Image: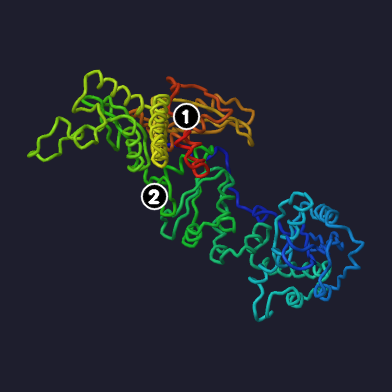
Amino acid sequence: MSDLPSSVPGMKMVQGTLDDLGTPLHEVTFVVVDLETTGGSPTECGITEIGAVKVRGGEVLGEFQTLVNPGESIPAFISVLTGITDTMVAGAPRIEVAIPAFLDFAAGTVLVAHNAGFDISFLKEASARVGRPWPGFPVLDTVHLARQLVTRDESPNHRLSSLARVFRATTTPDHRALHDARATVDVLHGLIARVGAQGVHSLEELKAYSSRVPATTRRKRHLADGLPDAPGVYVFKDGRGRALYVGTSVSIRTRVRSYFTASEGRRRMAEMVRIAESVTPIVCATALEAEVRELRLIAELKPPYNRRSRHPEKAVWVKLTVEAFPRLSIVRQVAPDGAHYVGPFSSRGRAEEAIAAVHEVIPLRQCTERLSPRRARPACALAELGRCGAPCAGHQTPEEYAVLTASAVALISGDGRAGMAALRERMSVLSDRERFEDARAVRDRMLTLVRGASRAQRLAPLSRIPELVAARRHLTAGGWELICVRHGRLAGSTRSPRGADPMPHVDALRASAEVVPAPLPPAPAAHPEETELVLRWLETPGVRIVDVDGEWTCPVGGASAAREELEPLEVSRARTPGFAATG
C-alpha cells in the first residue's frame, strides 16, 4: 500500500483525554420526570400529575409540578394509591396546557425516569394528541442501570421504594409525581457514582452502559485510546496480528469507539470485538483515499468479518463474439480481440441473467443437431423440436445475419434505446398472454443486463485516460482535496491548506503518484469497485477537473438511461403487481 500517502503532512497523534470521550456527566443537564395516570395504556387513559426535577452536576436547577385534568373520572383504586381525586384535578389545567409547559421546561436536556418506557410512552402520546412534535430527548432508565449495579444482596428488587432505601434518598416515594421524581434524583446520583468507579465519565458511556453492553465489550474500550481523529482506515486484529475486520471513517477514533457502545447492534461485530486485541489506524489525506484503501485491504487480507469486496477476483464479464455468428459467453478477463464486453458482474449467476435477457429478445442461440442419427431431420434440429426462434445459424440469409449481429451488438454494448424498445415489445407480448410473472422476470433480467452495460460504459472512458487530476473544496477544514487518477486507479491524493495556492500541491501529487500501466479497456487498472468509487467522487457537486490527458466522455442514449427507467420499476414491483407487464 505504498502507492498512496499514509498521512496528512504535519498531523500529530495526540493522546486522548477524558473530555474526548464525549460530554462529561457533570456538564449534562438531566430532567428526572415521574407521572401519575388514571391507569391503563397511553391511548386509553390520561395523565393526572406531572412532576420533574432539573439537575446538573449534582445540583437542583429547578422543579416542575402540576396536576392535570384528564377529562375523565379517576378510578377509585387509583385515588387510593395516589391520593389524587376528581375534586383535586377539577380545576387543574388540561393536557393541552400541561404538556407544552413541561416540554419547554425540559428542552435541551436528558430525560430520566424509573421504568422510563412507561412515562415516556405517555408523554409521547400526549404530545401527539395536542399536536406538539416530540423533541426526541435522549432517555436514561434508572431501572436498567440498577439491574446492572444493584445486587440481590443489597435489594430484593429494583422498585423505586427499594432503591431509595439503598441510596438513602432524602425523599420517600409515595406515588405522587414530584416526590417520586425527587427520590429518583437521589437514585440516579447513587448509580452515577457507582459507574464512575468503573471508568464511566461521559454521557455516551453512561448510555452505552445502561443499554446493557456486555462487560466483555466494555472492557475493550481501551482499544480506541490514542486513535487519530482523522479520515482513514482502521483494522481490527486478533492476538496473532491477523486482520479480523477492515473499516473506514471520516474519524477513525469516533468510529472505533462506537463498536464498544449500544449503537453497534450487529451480532458478528460483537463477536469480532470479543476476539480483537488491537486496532491499527491508517490515516489518509482524503475520505476517498480511505475508501479505496479499505477496498484494497479487504481484497488483500480477506478479513473474516467483512462480507463485501473480499473476492474481487471472482468478478466475470459477458463477452459477445461476432466473427462467425453472434455468440455470448462468460469470461474472467477482457482481451484485445475485437469482442464486445459487458460487466463486470459480481457472480456467474448475474452474468447468466444478462445473457438470458439478450436471448429473450434476440435469437442468438445457435441450432445444434442433437437428434438420433437414425432419424431423418431437417437442417435445424431445434426447429423440429419447436424451440428455434429463426433466424439462426441453421437457416438464415446474409441479410438476416447482418441484422441479427447489429441488433446483438447494439443491445450488448448498451444502446439504451435499442434495449428498451426490444424489452417493451417482448413484455407486451407476454402481457397480452397474461403471463405477468414472466414479464416481470424479463424486466429483471434486462435490468441486470443494462446495469452491466452501464458499468462497462462508465468504466471504459476512465480506464483509457492516462492521467486525470481533480479537486474539490474541503467543506470543514478549507483548502482543496486533490486526487490523481491513472487508468481508473487512484494513484494518489493529498490536501492543500486553507488559503494556500493549490498548484504546487498538484505538481507534487503528480510527481509522487503511482505509475500505472495501461490496462485492457473496458477493464480499468484497478478493481472496478475502486474505479466506481472514483467516478462517484468525480461526479459530486463542486468537483473541478484540473487537468486530463485524453477525453472523458459518456455515450448519449447509453445504458444509464435505460437503468434509470428500469430501477424504479424494480423498487415498486412489490406494491404494484403486474406493473412490469403493463408499464
Tell me if 582 is positioned left or right of 40 in this view: left
Coordinates of residue 63 in the picture (x, y in percent): 85, 61
What numbered label is drawn on residue 302?
A: 2
How are the residues colored? rainbow
| Residue topped by disc 1 | 484
**Location of residue 102 (image quadrant):** bottom right
Q: Are marks 2 and 1 in contact (CB under 8 Å)?
A: no
Residue sitting at 43 percent across and 34 percent down? 531
Q: Furthest residue to the top?
A: 399
Name the amino acid, label 2: Lys
| Residue at the image point whose x is 60% and y is 52% from the top | 15
Residue at the extreme front: 433
For the N terminus, which image quadrant? Answer: top left
Give the camera-side residue of 532 and 85. 85
**Sequence order check, earlier mark of 2 and 1:** 2
Q: Is residue 219 above or below residue 174?
A: above
